[in-house]
Image (cartoon, rainbow, N blue to C red):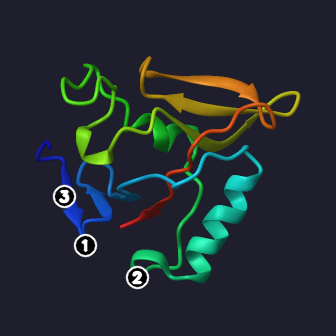
Amino acid sequence: MSARFTVRKDILVLDKETGLMWQRGASSDRMMWPEGFAYVERLNQEAWGGFDDWRYPTQEELATLLTAEESRETGLYIDPVFGDQRCCWSSTEAEHHRAVYADFYYGDLYVVEQKYANYFVRAVRNA
């Protein structure tokens, strides 16, 4: 883990560079893009991690987790502190019922049909 990230309560990660707090592990289940909103709402209802202001990350926020080099531990372009979830949705919509997601295996953002793919959701909040 780099000095950029601090783990809290073993389930939260504070990014000192952006001031964002992330779920350390993404959702336990994969889901289609629209289901991600309900997932984030449940986190807030439960005050998950002690907070009730979680949100679906934008593509810009999710892009801050992409690393320039592949991790030797996980083979992914994300700090190993976050685990091994390969693809995570962003809240960003694209034209024609499509949405942006981060693929940490290839290290970039992509667009796909909202109801075609099942990816993880990693919620974020301002720290």
Q: Is residue 50 positioned above or below 63 on the image?
A: below
Q: CA distance from mark 2 to mark 3?
A: 17 Å
Q: Label 3, secondary structure: give it.
A: strand
Does 59 sit left or right of 15 as displayed? right
Checking the image for residue 9, the label placed there is: 1
Q: Which residue is mark 2?
A: 50
Q: Is residue 12 left or right of residue 48?
A: left
| Distance CA(mark 3)–CA(mark 1) | 10 Å
Residue furthest front in the image: 29
Q: Residue at x 77, y 50 (%)?
A: 34
Q: Are marks 2 and 1 in contact (CB under 8 Å)?
A: yes
Disc 2, SS: helix
Q: From the image, tell me which residue sits under label 3.
A: 6
**Quadrant showing the C terminus:** bottom left
* Number of numbered tags placed on the structure image: 3
How far apart are the alpha carbons under marks 2 and 1? 10 Å
Q: Residue 123, position in %: x, y?
A: 51, 57
Residue situated furthest left in the rendering? 3
Q: Secondary structure at mark 1?
A: loop
